Amino acid sequence: MGPVVRFAATPAGRVAYTVTGSGPPLLCLAGWVSHLALMAENPQHERFFDGLARSRTVIRYDKIGCGLSDRSRTDFSLDVELATVRALTAHLGLDRFALFGSCEGGQVAAAYAAAHPDAVSALIVYGSCARGGDLAPPAVRASVLDLIRAHWGLGSRVLADIWLPAAPPPLTAMFARMQRAAADAATAAALLEMFYGCDVTALLPAIRVPTLVAHRRDSRAVPFERGRELASLIPGAQLAAFPGRMQPIYAEEPGAALAALLPFLGSAGSLPGPLTAREFQVADLIADGHTNPEIARRLGISVRTVDAHVEHVRTKLGVRARTQIAVWARRPA
């Protein structure tokens, strides 16, 4: 079984998300298109995120228009992506968290960190760039978009070859199928066009949080120079270069990526605990065997508020059952 998928309301529709692991929260922004259920079937993908989840509460989601999130979308803009992050983190009750953005998600993560420095404890940008228009000449970008719109099957295979050059055929085929399942042709083209048109250059100097920019040295999808430039524009950013040609961070030497990301997240500072003071109270009363109405009476709050606190505790701890909350609350200090 893959991770449990939950849903949160955003101004653009319902967003599908998963929560795994425990510890300080790490919100992960996927690239161009994603599908939580299908990506969980990729062993390399899951091994990488399981590695992060050993010390972090890892939150992943499909952007609006993709995967298990609402598919209807008409506004393809950075503003919608930022509004989704705000809505999801508010739904989860996250006051402060680390951000990890891949490819196009790296641009969104960087823009969010620039606008919300008090909410972001650390920023990781992988395989991204400051200006999407630098990824290819205008004629090439137009040709790729036309191909996606005209023949999504062929377009998905061409893009899989760009993202995963020299990969075993089963892996390339799996990636192409995931792309087609993640979005229809019109949405896939619109999202890629949004990436091509996004320019966060002016926002990068305003970032004031610990930042790691990671990149493949020989990526075909996003050349290394684009990542080097992005790192140079963020004050104090570190640059980590990974070997290989395949764009997804999990597709090639995932251990090397984890070896760079985990120490950075640790050195950037950890929260004293994943729960707020009120959530600790609720978790402690659950461990004592109290029901939600009993907790509401003890704390002088509504049952609906207790229900929300319990859901936030489940989400932050990455657990499903009240017994798991009780075990966590009674763990050795």
Image (cartoon, grey):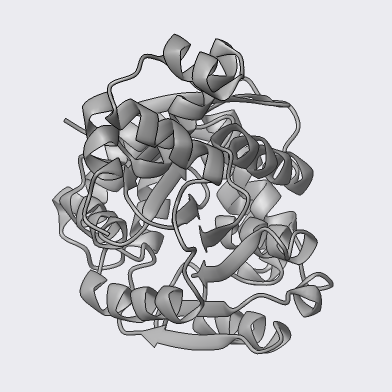
Vertical side of 46 occupied by 239: above or below: below
Residue placed most toward the observer, 117 or 48: 117
Give the quarter of the image for residue 65: top right
Left or right: 170 as drawn, with respect to 279: left
Vertical side of 212 occupied by 322: above or below: above
Residue drawn 36% across the image and 58% down it: 56
Q: Is residue 102 visible?
A: no
Q: Is residue 75 visible?
A: yes
* Furthest residue toward front: 298
Residue drawn 21% across the image and 39% down it: 327
Image quarter hosting the C terminus: bottom left
Give the quarter of the image for residue 241: bottom left
Coordinates of residue 222 in the picture (x, y in percent): 52, 71
Residue placed most toward the observer, 161 or 56: 56
Image quarter hosting the N terminus: top left
Give the quarter of the image for residue 207: bottom right
Residue placed most toward the observer, 185 or 2: 2
Left or right: 151 as drawn, with respect to 74: left
Residue drawn 79% across the image and 80% down it: 205
Coordinates of residue 272 in the picture (x, y in percent): 47, 63
Coordinates of residue 228 in the picture (x, y in percent): 58, 87
Coordinates of residue 9 in the picture (x, y in percent): 62, 23
Counting the numbered discs, the total is 0
Left or right: 71 as drawn, with respect to 287: right
